[in-house]
Structures are given as C-alpha cells and as structure tokens.
Amino acid sequence: MSTVTIVIQNAPYQSNNKAWHALRFAGAALIEDMDVRVHLLDDGVEVGRRNQQPPEAMVNLEILLSELIEYGLEVRACGMALDGCAIDEASMIEGIERGSMKALAVWVKDSDQVMVF
C-alpha cells in the first residue's frame, strides 16, 4: 500500500483554496486505498479548529476533515504552530493529535509521496 503525507501550511478559506484542495486530494487518496496522513503546519493549524464559520459558498472544512478522519485519515497539528496561533487542543477537531517536527520527519521518512499545500 502506498503512503502519502500531506502538509497543509495555508489557513482555510483563502482565495487560493489550498487547504480545501489538500483535503480533496486526501479524500481521493483514501478512496484509492492509500495510507494518508495530514500534518497541519503554520496557519494550516486553523484547518483543524472546531466551530469554523466558512464564508458563503465555501465548503466547511471542519465537516470535511471530520469525515476524512472517520474514514481513516491520520492528522497531526504542529505543537509550535498551535501555540503560536493560541489554539488549545480542546479547540481542535476530535481525532487530531498534537504533533512535532520529529513526528513529521518520521512520517516523511515512511512515505512514498509528500505533498505540501
């Protein structure tokens, strides 16, 4: 089985839609029976926040990410980024673990592909 690690560095609901595209790819990879891991880094930790209020006509990434976690997506959020964005773990979507660069390095080492959004 192929393993992909996706790093999301962009905040949700930006004009470039990078966070949304990353989660769309994660879902597609899960459907293709790949092991998929997402590491939220920098402003990307906002993707994992509960009680998101998406702009009109945009997909609610909290709902999408929660569904992907139910289907086996493994998600970690960088601890330093969480601290920098003043997000405590209780504010994160259930199933997201606090991560680190060391943990990300292990994922990258064990992955067949790494994608950054």
Image (cartoon, helix red, strand yellow):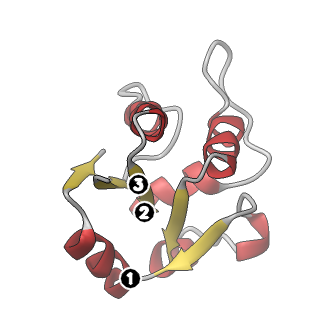
Which image quarter: residue 55?
top right
Judged left or right of residue 50, residue 101 is left
Which residue: 34% across, 81% down?
Answer: 101
The residue beneath circle 2 is 39
Residue 71, position as x, y percentages in the image: 63, 46
Of the numbered discs 2 and 1, the one sitting upstream in the chain is: 2
Which class describes the residues within 10 Å of circle 2: few (<14), some (14-19), or many (20+)? many
Circles 1 and 3, Cβ within 8 Å, touching? The answer is no
Residue farthest toward the front in the current orientation of the protein: 1
Secondary structure at badge 3 equals: strand
Q: From the viewer's perspective, tell me whether residue 63 is left or right of residue 79.
A: right
From the top left corner, tell me how far across and down residue 56 is, in percent.
68, 16
Instruction: Please say if the residues under marks 2 and 1 sit with CB atoms less than 8 Å apart.
Output: yes
Residue type highlighted by circle 2: His
Kindly identify which numbered label has been placed on residue 103.
Answer: 1
For residue 97, which quarter of the picture?
bottom right
Disc 1 or 3, which lies upstream in sequence?
A: 3
Residue 54 in the image, given as x and y percentages of width and height: 68, 30
Secondary structure of residue under mark 1:
helix
Q: Name the one closer to the observer, 81 or 63.
A: 63
Residue corresponding to mark 3: 35
Task: Classify mark 2: helix, strand or loop.
Answer: strand
Q: Residue at x 34, y 53 (%)?
A: 6
| Most foreground residue, 38 or 58 | 38
Label 1: few (<14), some (14–19) or many (≥20) C-alpha neighbours in 10 Å: some
Residue 85 coordinates in the image, percent (x, y): 56, 67
